[in-house]
Amino acid sequence: MDSAQTTSSAAATTGGVAAGGNGMMITQSNDASPVDSSATTAGTASTPTDDQKQNLTQVINSIQKTLGLLHQLYLTVSSYNVASQLPLLQRLNNLVLELDNMTRLAEKCNIQVPMEVLNLIDDGKNPDEFTRDVLNSCIAKNQITKGKTDAFKGMRRHLLEELEQAFPDEVETYREIRAASAAEAKRAAQAQSMLPNGDVKVKTEN
């Protein structure tokens, strides 16, 4: 065994530290390069939200690539001849590989798609119709809730008027308690909105 091989084997057995010819210690590291290290650090520092966005972007890119492959396959099939047999097989293989890649990427995405959206797409309709229907439904339910709230407010006002005629002293005490409770709640809200410099953000009431 020559001296170079001896030095290499000694470096391997001593954890990557070998003695040079001039007596200096030569350190051999198996760590990743600075580029790899920075990439690893960036990967570990990413948040789950960033990972989800990256996974979704990869799936979108795979879908777009699959659509491109399908278009190329359509052009090849529509003008098929003997000479286009090999390109046809290559594009079929590329399509199968990309579909497999899309499936693996989709497993990393946790996105819930309503079945109504898929049904609209299957029917050849615009999936934005689902968003429109949901918004219209929310507006209708909001109007119903607002009507109920206004009805309760009117009933409360009517009851206070009737009670004030029958029990004026008790109603006055009730109004004072309500006013004190509202003032206490306002002070607590102002204390929570205290600024670092000691100022208080007060919401003006119209």
Image (cartoon, rainbow, N blue to C red):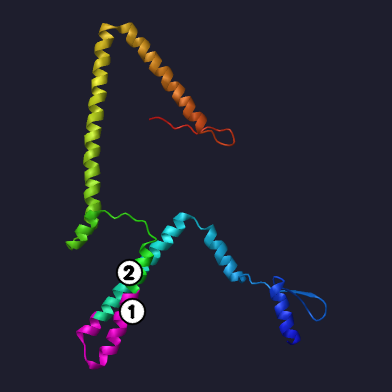
Q: Which residue is mark 2?
A: 63
Question: Which residue is at 26% across, 24% downward?
Answer: 153
Give the mark nearest the N terminus, 1 or 2: 2
Q: How many other residues sit within 10 Å of disc 1, few (<14), some (14-19) or many (≥20)?
A: some
* Image coords of residue 158 (percent x, y): 23, 17
* Image coords of residue 40 (percent x, y): 55, 64
Q: Is residue 23 left or right of residue 191?
A: right
Mark 1 or 2, which is nearer the eye?
A: 1
Q: Quadrant of residue 81?
A: bottom left
Q: Is residue 65 above or below residue 133?
A: below
Give the quarter of the figure containing the C terminus.
top left
Q: Is residue 62 left or right of residue 114?
A: right
User: Is 152 inside the magenta-drawn segment?
Assistant: no
Q: Which residues are magenta?
A: 74-97
Secondary structure of the residue carrying tag 2 is helix
Q: CA distance from mark 1 to mark 2?
A: 13 Å
Kind of residue at badge 1:
Asn
Outermost residue on the front side: it is 1
User: Is 86 inside the magenta-drawn segment?
Assistant: yes
Q: Quadrant of residue 103?
A: bottom left
Q: Is residue 32 above or below residue 147?
A: below
**Disc count in the image?**
2
* Image coords of residue 90 (percent x, y): 32, 84
* Image coords of residue 168 (percent x, y): 31, 7
Q: Which residue is mark 1?
A: 94
Residue nearest the viewer, comparing 48 with 163: 48
Q: How many other residues sit within 10 Å of disc 2, few (<14), some (14-19) or many (≥20)?
A: some
Question: Which residue is at 24% across, 12% downward?
Answer: 162
Secondary structure of the residue carrying tag 1 is helix
Which numbered dot is residue 17? none
Kind of residue at badge 2:
Ile
